[in-house]
Amino acid sequence: METMQVRPATLDDTQAISALFRSRITTWQRLNPQGQVEDVPYTALTIYERWLHGGPWMSVETGALQLSHLLRGAGMPVVAETNGQVRGYSEAYHGVEPEPFGDHLHIAHLTVAADGDSLKDAMLGHWREQAPSLRCRRVTATCAANDADGQALYERHGLSRLSRIQRFSLPARTGQVFYKATDHPAANPSQINGWYMQVGRFSSARQQWETLWPRTWYALPELRSQRAHRLHFLVAGQEAYVYCQQQLYEPRSADVYCWTPKPFSSQVLTAIRDWAHREGYRTLVLAVPDETVKLLGNEAEPDGYIQDTYAVTL
């Protein structure tokens, strides 16, 4: 008889979790010295080249760094086992944001073996059971707006659409606003407790912070050499933490993420655009909720990516 359980992940699970994520990659590739894409065996790739296929879980080495970061308090990782074999993985983040999210538990990276769809239900059920003991009033998860399977999974567990973000490109340009931008390396997540994240909230404010702000991946020289700015802005009496990441293949473009104690404002946006222009960027990429789109103005161009947050109140 098949037995199934969901349990906390440990460092001993790193290899099995990495294998789950790698199983979704059908072809391993890299650029050759002539700049052409070539298919190669997984073992021929460097750790960084593996990373480019999907992030830290693409190799055991960076997977161990990720799992260690989570186990030291950044998040809560679990594995789902069938007959003692790891066949599924997910992680959750406890965050406190203004409504509509509130005090919530955000579920991320629901990943299972090819024949393990039932394990997604098991892990979602696990997090719903855990949320009250963590004093979370709400459970949230995200998926692309065209992901019918993800929507069906969440709805089966009582989650319904709570919010939507769209991604836009916006020119960096000088602006008339008084502001001060200073480097801010401090990574304690308590700094954003109760803050809004109306730019770049692809998962939850806490998960995005834990993914971006700590220098977890500076062990890889290729990632360390890419421009990434961790900034504290003071704009006309308003505060903001801004993470700005140079795009890999478009060095004059940057992805922007922003946390604020008050709703995102046009003054903060003007300051970010001005700072970015002075830093040599020409295009900013921002994902924002529907209520923030109007602040971007007529110069903003959507790229077609839309993502929804689903939630259930317990």
Image (cartoon, rainbow, N blue to C red):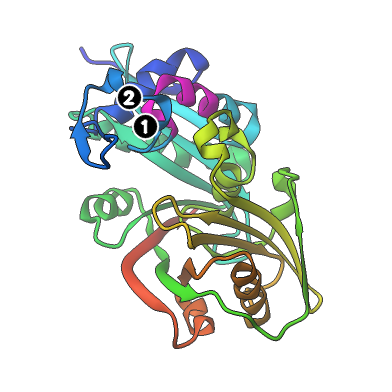
Left or right of 166 on screen, residue 130: right
- Residue 68 in view: yes
Q: Position of residue 256 (x, y in %)?
A: 54, 62
Residue in view at x 23 percent, y 35 percent: 117
Residue 37 occupies quadrant: top left
Distance from label 2 to label 1 (Cα)?
6 Å
- How would you rate the neighbour count of disc 2 (Cα within 10 Å): few for under 14, some for 14-19, many for 20 or more? some
Residue appearing at x 24%, y 27% in the figure: 23
The kind of residue on which mark 2 rests is: Leu
Q: Residue 232 at what x, y percent from top left? A: 74, 60
Residue at left offset 29%, top offset 20%:
44
The disc placed on residue 45 is: 2
Residue 193 in view, yes or no? no
- Left or right position of 278 against 252: right
Residue pictured at 40% horizontal, 68% vertical = 167
Secondary structure of the residue carrying tag 1 is helix
Q: Identify which residue, 277 or 133, lies in the foreground.
A: 277
Q: Is residue 239 above or below residue 45?
A: below
Task: Tell me which segment is drawn in magenta.
Answer: 56-67
Mark 1 neighbour density, 10 Å: few (under 14) some (14–19) many (20 or more): some
Residue 49: image tag: 1
Residue nearer the viewer, 196 or 310 = 196
Amino acid marked by disc 1: Glu
Please say if 239 is above or below 34: below
Q: Position of residue 257 (x, y in %)?
A: 56, 60
Q: Is residue 113 magenta?
A: no
In contact (CB < 8 Å): disc 2 and disc 1: yes
Q: Nearer the viewer, residue 261 or 85?
A: 261
Q: Report helix, strand or loop for mark 2.
A: loop
Instruction: Tell me if residue 62 is in the magenta stretch.
Output: yes
Prevailing secondary structure class for the magenta stretch in the rendered image? helix
Q: Quadrant of the N terminus?
A: top left
